[in-house]
């Protein structure tokens, strides 16, 4: 199992229509085959300055690779993520 997580800040104002549209449109990612337990999260801690997080799981490396190469993921990254995300940190885990 691989847990893929990314924490990020958007370029949009908090609570703006553009922020809401980004989060709504990101739900396309959970439609990609192999994605399990997709979550959108809002930061509540003051321990870091990231505002949002996405988390999802994959059965194995092959499923994760297929997700990364899937046309819906590639399109979302190119058309939305690269243009609207100010900064991010991506972390991928597997059980020890």
Image (cartoon, rainbow, N blue to C red):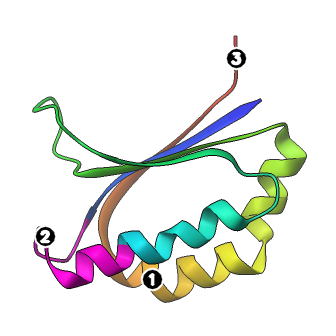
Residue located at (11% from left, 75% from top): 13
The count of marks equals 3
Residue 15: which disc? Answer: 2
Residue 76 point in image, percent of width and height: 56, 79
Tell me the quadrant of the picture where the C terminus can be found: top right
Q: Secondary structure at mark 3?
A: loop
Q: Quadrant of residue 16?
A: bottom left
Q: Earlier in the sequence, mark 2 or mark 3?
A: 2
Residue at image mark 3 = 95
Q: Are marks 2 and 3 in contact (CB under 8 Å)?
A: no
Q: Tell me which numbered mark, 2 or 1, is placed earlier along the sequence.
A: 2
Magenta residue span: 10-22
Identify the residue at the far right of this view.
62
Q: Tell me the distance, in whole angstroms, between the alpha carbons under discs 2 and 1.
A: 17 Å
Within-10-Å neighbours for mark 1: few <14, some 14–19, many 20+: some
In the picture, measured across the screen, residue 20 lies left or right of residue 82, that is: left
Give the left or right position of residue 88, taking residue 91 as reference.
left
Q: In x, y percent, where is residue 47?
A: 15, 29
Query: Residue at 25% across / 83% down in the picture?
Result: 18
| Residue carrying label 1 | 80
For the residues marked 2 and 3, what is the alpha-carbon distance in whole angstroms? Answer: 35 Å
For numbered disc 1, what is the local secondary structure?
Answer: helix
Residue drawn at x 23%, y 42% is 43
Say left or right for 67 vs 8: right
Q: Quadrant of residue 60?
A: top right
- Look at discs 2 and 3 and give the one toward the viewer: 2
Tell me where residue 55 appears, x and y as whole percent.
52, 44
Quadrant in the picture for the N terminus: top right
Q: What residue do we see at 50% from left, 89% from top? A: 79
């Amino acid at each position: 199992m691989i847990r893929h997580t990314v924490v990020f800040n958007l370029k949009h104002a908090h609570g703006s229509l553009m922020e809401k549209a980004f989060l709504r449109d990101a739900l396309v990612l959970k439609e990609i085959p192999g994605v399990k337990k997709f979550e959108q999260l809002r930061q509540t801690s003051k321990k870091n300055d990231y505002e949002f997080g996405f988390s999802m799981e994959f059965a194995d490396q092959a499923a994760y690779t297929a997700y990364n190469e899937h046309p819906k993921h590639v399109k979302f990254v190119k058309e939305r993520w690269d243009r609207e995300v100010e900064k991010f940190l991506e972390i991928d885990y597997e059980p020890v």
